[in-house]
Amino acid sequence: MAESESFIELEEASESASQAVRGTNMSLAELGRASETTDKALAGLVKDMSGLERGMRSGLKGAFEDLVFEGGKLSDVLKDAANSVVRSTYNAAVNPVIDGISGSISSGIGDFVGGLFGFAKGGSFSQGRVMPFTNGGVVNGPVTFPMRGGTGLMGEAGPEAIMPLTRGADGKLGVRSAGGGRPVSVVMNISTPDAQSFQRSQGQIAAQMTRALNRGNRNR
């Protein structure tokens, strides 16, 4: 009995140790991600400080060159040096903000212009690209497209066909069939006992042909 209890206690201790190891691994992974983020932030800070240093050095050098080589007044040189330091500090602080705003504006203008050119021909968005469907096509996967008051989704359940509509001779709007533009041949066999009988029946035969053709056009 004592041996069984000792074995159970050993298993519980082993499980606790395993959980502690897993927790330690997770903590180390999180620490690694935090360290990577910190490294990136420090690299950006070093880059900004280097730019600030170069700007200040260039401004101070130019100011003292005016004093030595151009015979400028010391008060003017010191004023120029101070302005140079202020300008470099200002640029270092403001440039990242301006870059962010410019990037957002450029992205918005690009999306707007892309939408104009894409949807002037009829299109939808797939993976950020505009796909024209003026002549129809097939969508094999989920694709979004703009609608009045929202965004539509097609192809979410499988392939879907896009078929352009055309207006027929009767004024109705519908899908044009592939063979709609090909000529149709109609053959009628007429049997008469003689030529005189055929001539007498020409009007009746023409009327029957007209009615048959009209029925065929309505049933297409």
Image (spheres, grey):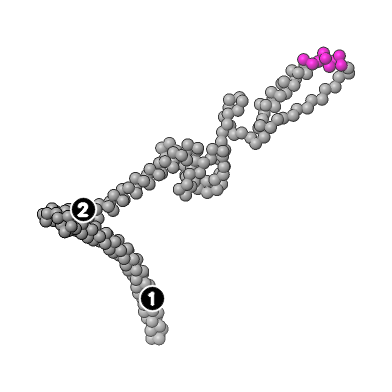
Q: Is residue 36 magenta?
A: no
Neighbours of disc 1 within 10 Å: few (<14), some (14-19), many (20+): few
Mark 2–mark 1 CB contact (< 8 Å) = no
- Could you say where residue 56 lies in the image, as x and y percent from the top left? 21, 58
What residue is pinned by disc 1?
18
| Position of the C terminus by quadrant | top right
Taking the image as shown, residue 68 lies to the left or right of residue 45, namely left
For the point 71% across and 24% down, which residue is it? 213
Q: CA distance from mark 2 to mark 1?
A: 58 Å
Which three-letter amino acid code belongs to the residue tagged 1? Ser
What secondary structure predominates along the stretch shown in magenta? helix
For the point 47% across and 36% down, which residue is it? 120
Give the farthest residue toward the right: 193
What residue is pinned by disc 2?
87
Taking the image as shown, residue 166 lies to the left or right of residue 72, namely right
**On the image, which quarter does residue 9 sit in?**
bottom left
Neighbours of disc 2 within 10 Å: few (<14), some (14-19), many (20+): some
Q: Secondary structure at mark 2?
A: helix
**Image height check: is 206 above or below 121?**
above
Where are the magenta residues, as a range?
195-203
Q: Is residue 96 visible?
A: yes
- Could you say where residue 109 lies in the image, as x and y percent from the top left? 38, 43
Taking the image as shown, residue 67 lies to the left or right of residue 218, namely left
Taking the image as shown, residue 12 lies to the left or right of residue 193, namely left
| Position of the N terminus by quadrant | bottom left
For the point 69% across and 25% down, which residue is it? 215
Q: Is tag 2's residue or tag 1's residue first in the polypeptide sequence?
A: 1
Q: Secondary structure at mark 1?
A: helix
Q: Which of the pair 27/34 is nearer the observer?
A: 34
